[in-house]
Amino acid sequence: MDDDRFVRLGTLLNAWLTRRASLGVLVAIGGRGGLLASEQAAAKKHKHKHKKRCKKPKSRCGRACCPAGQFCREGRCQPRPFAGGCLPEQNACLTEPNMCPDEPTRMCVPLENGEPLCGERLCGPCTTDAECVPQTGSARALCIPSCALCQELNISQSACVIPAR
C-alpha cells in the first residue's frame, strides 16, 4: 500500500472511530497480512521435504529401512527366502519341473521382485500372503499373484508357496 492510500485510510478511520479503535483495525489488518505471510513460509518449508534414504546395504520399505539380508514384502521387512540353489530364470510357474538343486522335492519360484525362492507351490487364489495361511496351514506362506502354470491348469491365477526353510 502506498503512502497516500495509507494516510487516506487513517484519516477515514479517524473520522469514524476513536484513536484506539482505529489503531486496533490497522493492527488487525497488518497482523492478518503477517499471518498469511507466515502460513506461506510454513507451506513452502514443508513443500521441499525429502524422504530420507537408507544407507547401503539397507533398502527402503515403506517408512522403514530393511537391514542387509532382508527384503520388503507387503510393506514389511522380512528375511530373504531360502533360494535352495535356484536361479531367477528357473520358474516352476512357467514350466515344470523346475526343482530346487539343493532341495529336489521342492520347486523354484521367483518372487515379484525376481528373487528366487525354493518351496512348495500350491495353486490357489491369493492377493496377499495372509490369504495363503489358511490354504497352506503355514504362517510363512507367500503369495505369487501371477502363476501361468496354475492358469493353464485352470486352477487359479495365483499360487501360494511355502518356503523350504
Image (spheres, rainbow, N blue to C red):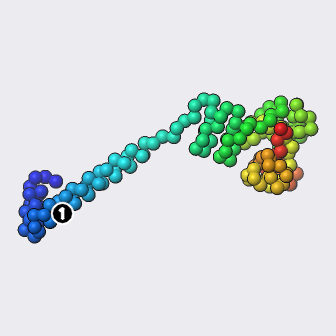
Q: Is residue 93 above or below residue 125?
A: above
Residue 121 screen position, x and y as percent: 85, 45
Residue 48 screen position, x and y as percent: 43, 42
Query: Which corner quadrant holds the C terminus?
Result: top right
Identify the amino acid type marked 1.
Answer: Val
Q: In the image, 115: left or right of 92?
A: left
Q: Residue furthest toward the front?
A: 20
Tell me what residue is drawn at x 73 percent, y 38 percent. Answer: 79
- Foreground residue, 12 or 19? 19
Q: Quadrant of residue 24?
A: bottom left
Query: Which corner quadrant holds the N terminus?
Result: bottom left
Q: Quadrant of residue 80?
A: top right
Q: In the image, 30: left or right of 157?
A: left
Tell me what residue is drawn at x 7 percent, y 63 percent. Answer: 11
Q: Is residue 150 visible?
A: no
Q: Is residue 92 above or below residue 29?
A: above
Residue 77 screen position, x and y as percent: 67, 41
Q: How many marks?
A: 1
- What SS does tag 1 mark? helix
Q: Is residue 19 above or below residue 112?
A: below
Residue 52 screen position, x and y as percent: 52, 38
Q: Is residue 4 visible?
A: yes
Q: Within 10 angstroms of label 1, few (less than 14), some, or many (20 or more) residues?
A: some
To which residue does mark 1 refer? 25
Q: Residue furthest toward the right?
A: 105
